[in-house]
Amino acid sequence: MKAFHKSLRWRIQAGHAIILLVVLVAFGGTAYWLVRENNFKRLDAELQRRITAVVAGIGPPPALGWEPGFRLQREHRTLFEDGGPGSYYYLVISASGKTIASSPNAPANVPVPAFKDASSDPVVRQRGEFREFMLLSTRPMPPGLMGEQKGVPRVLAPPNRSSANPMVDPPSMPSTPRFRFPLDANFVKKFFPQTMVVVGCSIAPVQAELRHLAWGFTVAGAAVIFLGVATGWHFSGRAIKPIGAISHAARVVAGGNLSERIKIKDATSELGELAGVLNETFTRLQSAFARQAQFTADASHELRTPTFVILLQAQAALKRERSAEEYREALSVCQMAAQQMKNLVNSLLILARQDAPTSEIHRVPCAVDEIVTESASLLRSLAAERNVQVHLDLKSAMALGDPTQLKQVIANLLVNAIEYNRPGGEVKLAVFQDTTGVVFVVSDTGVGISSRDLPHVFDRFYRADNSRSSAEGHTGLGLSICKAIIESHRGTITVASELGKGTTFTVMLPLVPHSETDTEASADPSLRNAPYAITPSITLP
């Protein structure tokens, strides 16, 4: 049994699970980040509103002190009244580090940065479970006391006096008499102090909500992955179930049961189409094995008969002393049986060579009309013996093929047309060439072939009814050899017959390419004067 991780089903599910996990993590992470950002944006807006309220409550120091004053306005007091979890707090810290004001729920020991490093814009920080806004607040100076540079007091010298004793001219009363007073460091610290404002709140409820959301996403994602994998496992099992049937059928066929077929319900699916192709392959394989077995049995049967005749004649001749005439008769029978065996073996060798996938045919341009003329001339005596007239209608035609093998095809067809004809019958041979190829037609007026036997005439060792099986010396391989040779030449051979009226065989061979014709003609000018070439017009009795 194969390892679990090597299973196609497991690999498919692992891929689906990884894709599903990535999608869920991306979706859950994005949703979590959006919820978190929305919560903190809402929280930061509340902190901004509250720090503005606290800054508005900062005032000048009291009459006898230097520290800034603080009084939270009445309309802002409700912003810090809730003392429960998540409530807001504030602290106001002076430059000396003293806490000027704070809400009751403010945590102790809140760290603040040095005033020189602080910013006048709100700065967000998060420490532990607290989120805080901080800013450095300076009570604004009156606009008339500001020079060209922000925060620099305007220093005016009185008329007719040196600027060594600077006096401040309050610009709030430009049209009134001038009031001059010294502007020293104590004055600036007292009336324009700096303070650090911290406003924050506990984010424990927000963090708890986010943790709950994260756990919810995790549990939901795990459930989705589990359900997705389980559902995918079920459906992938159904999808690849035909593979098991295919494997089982292949093992059965490999075991020798060639009748086994793959049973697939959905023949339109991809695996259904594959099963259909494999079933066709199994059918052809079974047919090939059956033909091979039948071929072997028929060959054995055909060889057994002449072997038995030879053995029987030899035993009879050796059993007792016989006359020379009797020995001669026995030897003659043995010779006939041996000749039949020779013909059968030669036919089997031809078929074996044609069936061999590595068999090569030496194709050359050859004149089919001349080959037909020669074959007809050689069979003149057979036609005269059977009282059959042979008529030739030959046109010049060049085909690409092996002349020896084409001779054998023509001879086989012509012998059959003569031997299976009636006394006084006719055989017509026609050769012509058209745009599709070279056509060779053999027709006779013989007994014909029944419609039941016609589909099997090219099968090996097949013999039709008695009317066509009466000829002696036939092995049932002649037409099989013709078909194998013609198909090896990339041609076709067909048969048409009507019982009692005759049979017609039509052979079509491919034309000779012009380049090959020119090459062969230039290389061998005597090609058309080959040994088999004779006068194409012959009249047979």
Image: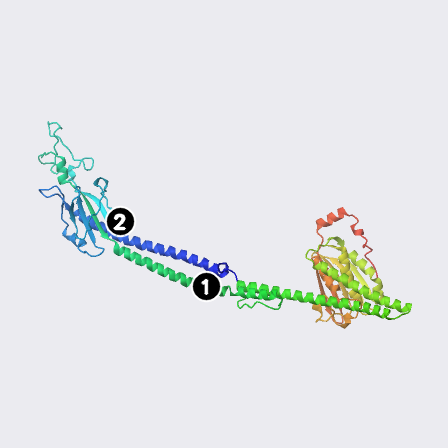
Q: CA distance from mark 2 to mark 1?
A: 47 Å
- Identify which residue, 123 or 524, lies in the foreground: 123
- Whole-percent x and y of residue 245? 54, 66
Q: Amino acid at mark 2?
A: Gln
Q: Which residue is mark 1?
A: 233
Q: How is the image coloured?
A: rainbow
Question: Which numbered disc, 2 or 1, marks the residue that appears first in the sequence?
Answer: 2
What is the three-letter code of the residue carrying label 1? Answer: Trp
**Residue drawn at x 51%, y 65% as measured from the top left:** 241
Q: Quadrant of the C terminus?
A: bottom right
Q: Residue at the location (74% across, 60% down)?
A: 349
Q: Is 229 left, or right, of 368 in this rendering?
A: left
Secondary structure of the residue carrying tag 1 is helix
Residue 147 at x, y = what percent? 18, 35
How busy is the neighbourhood of tag 2: few (under 14 within 10 Å), some, or many (20 plus)? few
Q: Position of residue 515 (x, y in %)?
A: 71, 49
Front residue of this view, candidates 206 and 492: 206
Mark 2, residue position = 126
Instruction: Decide if residue 429 is in sight here.
Output: no
**Left or right: residue 12 compared with residue 108:** right
Quarter residue 263 falls in:
bottom right
